């Protein structure tokens, strides 16, 4: 039986509590329960140090948010413990992205393909964006739950932009077009997906 690294397990536990606490709808809560139930079984883990990108210069500011919620405070603390091992990556620049997108964003898979724990069934990751960056419109087959830890704006389908705020959570149905953009402060958001037929 594979045992998960202590810091990664502590992060996963904190993520479950926070995602579950702030899930807004029944579909989001069901998705969260399924995702974290699957994480009860650990998979092989990557060793070694991670790699940062230019956008990571905004990480300290993004993690310095003030919140009265103990669950979010714990999630931030647990994330800080694993972040040095994350391999931050860029998404391909696309037509709907802002011109500063390439160096203004960074994504890291925490659990999932290329993450600290290599697996294909669950993707648990994080996106960081510098101020005034627009992430491109994108979509994917799995449903998705976001947990936002910063100011910032999000969009689903052809709807208007909305601001979940710190601790805001929302659910993306499968294949819905969605995007995000930062305002005057860095944007930091966690996201969780469960791949079907695994």
Image: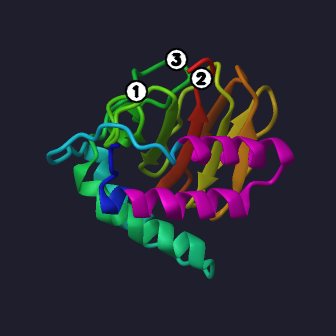
Q: Which mark is residue 95?
A: 3
Asked if the stretch drawn in magenta spans residue 32, the answer is: yes
What x and y, as percent, mark residue 130? 41, 50
Residue extending farthest right: 26
Q: What residue would you read off at disc 2? A: 138
Ranked by sequence position, the earlier of labels 1 and 2 is 1
Mark 1–mark 2 CB contact (< 8 Å): yes
Camera-nearest label, 3 or 2 = 2
Rendered residue at 30%/55% (across/down): 5
Q: Residues within 10 Å of mark 3 (few under 14, many from 20)?
A: few
Q: Nearer the viewer, residue 35 or 18?
A: 35
Q: Which mark is residue 119?
A: none
Q: Is residue 107 visible?
A: no
Q: Which mark is residue 91?
A: 1
The local secondary structure at tag 2 comes to loop
Quarter of the figure with the C terminus: top right
Q: CA distance from mark 1 to mark 2?
A: 11 Å
């Amino acid at each position: 039986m594979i045992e998960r690294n202590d810091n990664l397990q502590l992060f996963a536990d904190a993520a479950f509590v926070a995602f579950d606490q702030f899930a807004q709808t029944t579909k989001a809560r069901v998705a969260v329960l399924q995702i974290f139930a699957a994480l009860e079984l650990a998979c092989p883990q990557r060793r070694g140090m991670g790699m940062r990108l230019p956008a990571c210069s905004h990480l300290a500011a993004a993690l310095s948010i003030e919140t009265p919620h103990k669950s979010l405070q714990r999630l931030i603390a647990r994330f800080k413990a694993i972040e040095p091992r994350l391999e931050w990556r860029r998404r391909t620049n696309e037509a709907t992205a802002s011109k500063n997108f390439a160096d203004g964003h960074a994504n890291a898979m925490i659990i999932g393909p290329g993450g600290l724990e290599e697996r294909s069934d669950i993707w648990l990751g994080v996106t960081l964006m510098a101020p005034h960056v627009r992430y491109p419109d994108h979509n994917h087959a799995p449903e998705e739950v976001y947990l936002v830890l910063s100011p910032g704006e999000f969009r689903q389908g052809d709807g208007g932009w909305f601001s979940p705020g710190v601790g805001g959570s929302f659910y993306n149905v499968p294949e819905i077009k969605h995007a995000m953009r930062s305002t005057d402060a860095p944007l930091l958001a966690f996201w969780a997906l469960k791949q079907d037929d695994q």
